[in-house]
Image: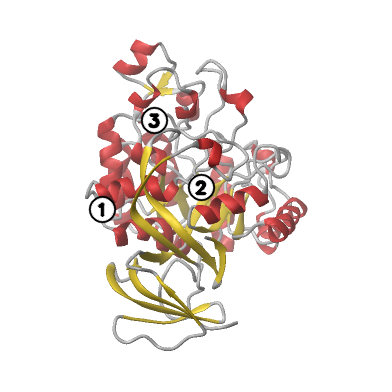
Amino acid sequence: MPKLLFTNARLIDPEAQTEALGWLLVKDGSIAATGVDAAPSADEVIDCKGKCLAPGIVDIGVKVGEPGERHRESYASAGRAAAAGGVTTIVIRPDTSPALDTPEALEFVMRRAKEDSLVNVLPIAALTKGRLGHEMSEIGFLLDAGAVAFSDCDAVVTNTKVFQRALTYAKSLGALVIAHPQEPTLSAGACATSGKFAALRGLPSVSPMAERMGLDRDIALLEMTGGKTGARYHADQITTSRALPALERAKANGLDITAGTSIHHLTLNELDVADYRTYFKLKPPLRAEDDRIATVQAVASGLIDIISSMHTPQDEESKRLPFEEAASGAVALETLLPAALRMVHAEQMTLPQLFRALALNPAKRLGLATGRLSKGAPADLTLFDPDKPFILDRATLMSKSKNTPFDGQRLQGKVVSTYVAGEKVFG
């Protein structure tokens, strides 16, 4: 491969927590060097003209419709959407039809991903068979087949003994368990967060305490698996201020715990549901503004480690229903970065802090070499203009499904080009 040199770039380094005007050299698909002084020679030179060059986003928790719901999203369309959004690695969820709970199912989707996707694809396998919470999946065989983590997604394992056994077994294999912290009985059927707004709209709601209760249970089980030497655990979405003290205590006590949140819970609140707009129906539901601000602050401080798109494509028929009956979820692969830049423009966090949560931390949690600008790291990169404004038109999205809450909204920040292992996949 020819040497590729990026010059006049604002290098966003999430490891060093710095940004500086400089250059970056790519050789044989990896980052060969970076600097701020005189640039070396190269076969191809790209003048970034002062735009930002950052590690490609590592997005944990992306739903692709294969197998079973290819009409909603395929690996080809998800790959195009990811590349257009500066995402270079998508970590796919197992909540497909059927669930990704056998080595054969995992091998099928990995083959399809390798054939069709423009970006890297890594699979999460189901923690229990069929995501039913009754019987543990074949964790060892699934690890051998390429699973990077195990999760039943939003199907919370209600049988505490089954979940405790799964955590213990995962610990023995060094496997990462990703859980959805929610008390399932309280949250069943809810489509809003309890409070005055939900009451006025007549929507079935759930208390923010349900998230705290779910997290408290999981933390107690982590302690049972060995405390500081216990299981590896990641909470997929922390969205309320009530859950943050428990997370902070667990980290202070040395448990192997990390947490993520979704871009929608960082940039939207319960009032956005307003006229029963189903594109704003998410799981967990959108929270109060105080919760949103507390979650943003937790990401900036590093208490919440990871920001994900929680990309969930739904077809028009499943969204054009009464709010209570409509499917939950929104697409976000393309809107993840411009939406996240709202927090930078509001001076709630810096670009290095943002990319710590978007790229570095998810890569570290999964043991990947990407997500950084250091020498020897894969040249998975995104070049973007953080200040370019645009009005989002959902019809232009690369995803097959168009269920975005940002349709018609003014966003600021456009991806110019995306590179995977030094090869341009967008731009």
Locate residue 156: give its quadrant.
top right
Q: Nearer the viewer, residue 48 or 259?
A: 48
Locate residue 102, reporting x and y percent.
73, 50
Question: Which residue is pictured at 41% across the width and 48% down the height?
Answer: 260
Label 2: which secondary element: loop
Q: Nearer the viewer, residue 78 or 148?
A: 78
Locate residue 98: give its quadrant.
top right
Q: Earlier in the sequence, mark 1 or mark 2?
A: 2
Which residue is the site of mark 1? Answer: 349
Which residue is the site of mark 3? Answer: 286
Report the amino acid beneath label 3.
Answer: Leu
In this rendering, is residue 94 above or below 242? below
Q: Nearer the viewer, residue 29 or 41?
A: 41
Which residue is the site of mark 2? Answer: 333
Report the amino acid beneath label 2.
Answer: Leu
Mark 3 vs mark 2: in front: 2
Report the amino acid beneath label 1.
Answer: Met
**CA–CA distance between discs 1 and 2?**
21 Å
**CA–CA distance between discs 1 and 3?**
21 Å
Q: Earlier in the sequence, mark 3 or mark 2?
A: 3
Locate residue 110, reporting x and y percent.
70, 57
Q: Is residue 171 in sight in this rendering?
A: yes
Mark 1 vs mark 3: in front: 1
In this rendering, is residue 281 above or below 219? above
